[in-house]
Image: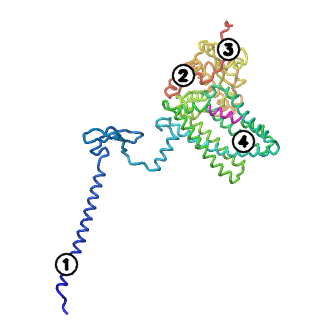
């Protein structure tokens, strides 16, 4: 049977219509995609400062590198609508991580960091944080030991007696704090040495507290001694804190620097406490744990103090500057002078150079004084060497002013370096076989040595001052801690 032509034509027409409709739909989708891309490109290329026609840009603002524009909406008559003045950010929103870092930064670094602080601020805070971490960790073990010792003693005493013991412990610490406050100005000119000594005392106090676990029946004397030592350490930390932060501050932001520095210390202390709590659950060896934490604490404290760069010349830094000047002809930079300063020269130790000493300490017999005095007729001081004590002494006259005291200190350090140089030469001669060579300390030898130093000082003291000033050093006689004794003329009564 032959196929019907009408049916074939109808089928072909239906297929053509379907194809045409599909082609039209595909073309519409392509046009839609192109329009979407064109609109997106136009929006992306729109300048940030463009505002809708109904908004008027008033001004722009910048805070810490982030910018805003202030706009106001206008009505048909061109007047500003009420409460339409608002800021629009010109930046994409910060990522949550960046917002968290900005929030933390606002607590731990001063405003305007790093331009608002000295370059030595970062290493100082790094070591300070590490020191507080070890200190917080040790605090858990010392507190645990004290409470354990009190628990043992409680079995042998009434609760009231235990409370009295604890109160006496705290009271003894306050007494020690008051007694150490008499150090006075030593906190200003020897603050690095005292700061490090305070941290050593803090470790000693922690060690005494741990010792109560071995002798719990001696809780009261041990705990009192530990508290006295730790409170003395607290005085040194509190008294030296402001001068150190002052060295970091640029401008009038010492309060901000202090607040952020203390915040960093507290955060590190809390982290150390948490770490120690987790560590204590494993019941580690008390002696081993304390030894490791103490080593970390002392090392961090030493590096913390060494990282401080002070602009003033105290006795230790003055000696470094004079020695470098005599050997190389140049005064060390601030960083070099502070790095070479001896942190272990504590104020209560005997020093080889004594400024403002008494006559009986400086001279071993009257003939030495009579022989040397004429060399210093034009000076407001007398410098000498006492061979019995192996020290250089600078005796100040009653007319001595600030520059005279600085010159006396310079002269004394020149004499000290010259005597040490002579000793080194004598030692080398002995090593080469000249057994008769020796450093003599007769009055004539001292007088000859003094004559040499007078020539050196006359030619180089002014140059030393100028070079020290060029390096940024601030010199003051008060920072050298001169003694109060003064030499009066014989005709005065």
- Identified at 68% across, 53% down, the residue is 281
Report which residue position mark 2 lands on. 460
> How many labels were placed on the picture?
4
Dot placed on the residue nearer the N-terminal end, 1 or 2 = 1
Q: Which residue extends farthest right? A: 156
Reading the image, the residue beneath label 1 is 13
Would you say 21 lies left or right of 450 here?
left
Q: Which residues are magenta?
A: 228-238
Between marks 1 and 4, how big is the CA–CA gap? 103 Å
> Can residue 215 be seen at all in this image of the molecule?
no
What separation in Å lies between label 3 and label 2 (alpha carbons)?
24 Å
Pinpoint residue 332: horizontal percent, then vertical percent.
Answer: 53, 31
* Whether residue 145 can be seen here: yes
Which comes sooner in the sequence, label 3 or label 2? 3
CA gap between label 1 and label 2 equals 115 Å
Question: Disc 3 vs disc 4: which is toward the camera?
Answer: 4
- Magenta residue check for 394: no
Q: Which residue is mark 3?
A: 371
Going 53% across and 41% down the picture, which residue do you hit? 108
Camera-side residue of 50 and 8: 8
């Amino acid at each position: 049977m032959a196929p019907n032509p009408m049916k074939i034509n109808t089928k072909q027409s239906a297929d053509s219509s379907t194809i045409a409709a599909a082609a039209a739909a595909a073309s519409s989708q392509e046009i839609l995609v192109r329009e979407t891309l064109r609109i997106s490109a136009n929006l992306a290329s729109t300048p940030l400062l463009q505002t809708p026609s109904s908004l008027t840009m008033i001004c722009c603002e910048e805070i810490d590198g982030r910018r805003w524009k202030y706009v106001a909406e206008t009505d048909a008559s061109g007047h500003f609508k009420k409460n339409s003045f608002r800021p629009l950010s010109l930046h994409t929103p910060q990522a949550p991580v960046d917002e968290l870092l900005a929030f933390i930064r606002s607590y731990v670094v001063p405003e305007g960091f790093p331009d608002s602080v000295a370059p030595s601020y970062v290493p100082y805070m790094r070591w300070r944080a590490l020191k507080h971490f070890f200190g917080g960790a040790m605090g858990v073990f010392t507190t645990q030991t004290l409470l354990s010792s009190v628990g043992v003693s409680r079995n042998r005493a009434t609760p009231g007696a235990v409370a009295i013991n604890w109160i006496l412990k705290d009271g003894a610490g306050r007494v020690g704090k008051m007694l150490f406050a008499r150090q006075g100005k030593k906190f200003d000119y020897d603050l690095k040495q005292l700061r490090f000594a305070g941290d050593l005392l803090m470790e000693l106090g922690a060690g005494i507290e741990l010792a109560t676990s071995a002798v719990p029946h001696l809780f009261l004397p041990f705990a009192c001694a530990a508290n006295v030592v730790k409170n003395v350490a607290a005085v040194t930390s509190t008294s030296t804190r402001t001068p150190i932060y002052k060295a970091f501050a640029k401008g009038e932001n010492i309060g901000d620097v202090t607040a952020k520095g203390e915040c960093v210390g507290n955060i590190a202390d809390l982290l150390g406490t948490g770490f120690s709590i987790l560590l204590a659950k494993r019941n580690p060896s008390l002696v081993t744990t304390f030894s490791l934490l103490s080593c970390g604490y002392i090392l961090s404290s030493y590096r913390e103090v060494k990282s401080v760069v002070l602009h003033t010349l105290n006795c230790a830094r003055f000696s470094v500057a004079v020695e470098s000047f005599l050997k190389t002809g140049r005064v060390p930079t601030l960083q070099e002078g502070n790095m070479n300063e001896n942190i272990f020269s504590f104020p209560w130790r005997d020093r080889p150079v004594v400024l403002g000493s008494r006559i009986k300490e400086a001279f071993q017999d009257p003939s030495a004084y009579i022989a040397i005095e004429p060399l210093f007729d034009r000076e407001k001081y007398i410098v000498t060497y006492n061979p019995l004590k192996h020290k250089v002494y600078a005796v100040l006259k009653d007319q001595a002013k600030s520059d005279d005291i600085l010159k006396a200190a310079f002269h004394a350090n020149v004499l000290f370096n010259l005597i040490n140089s002579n000793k080194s030469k004598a030692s080398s001669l002995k090593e080469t076989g000249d057994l008769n060579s020796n450093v003599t300390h007769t009055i004539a030898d001292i007088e000859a040595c003094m004559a040499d130093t007078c020539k050196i000082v006359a030619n180089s003291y002014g140059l030393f001052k100028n070079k020290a000033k060029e390096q940024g050093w601030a010199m003051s006689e008060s920072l050298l801690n001169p003694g109060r004794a003064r030499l009066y003329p014989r005709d005065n009564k």
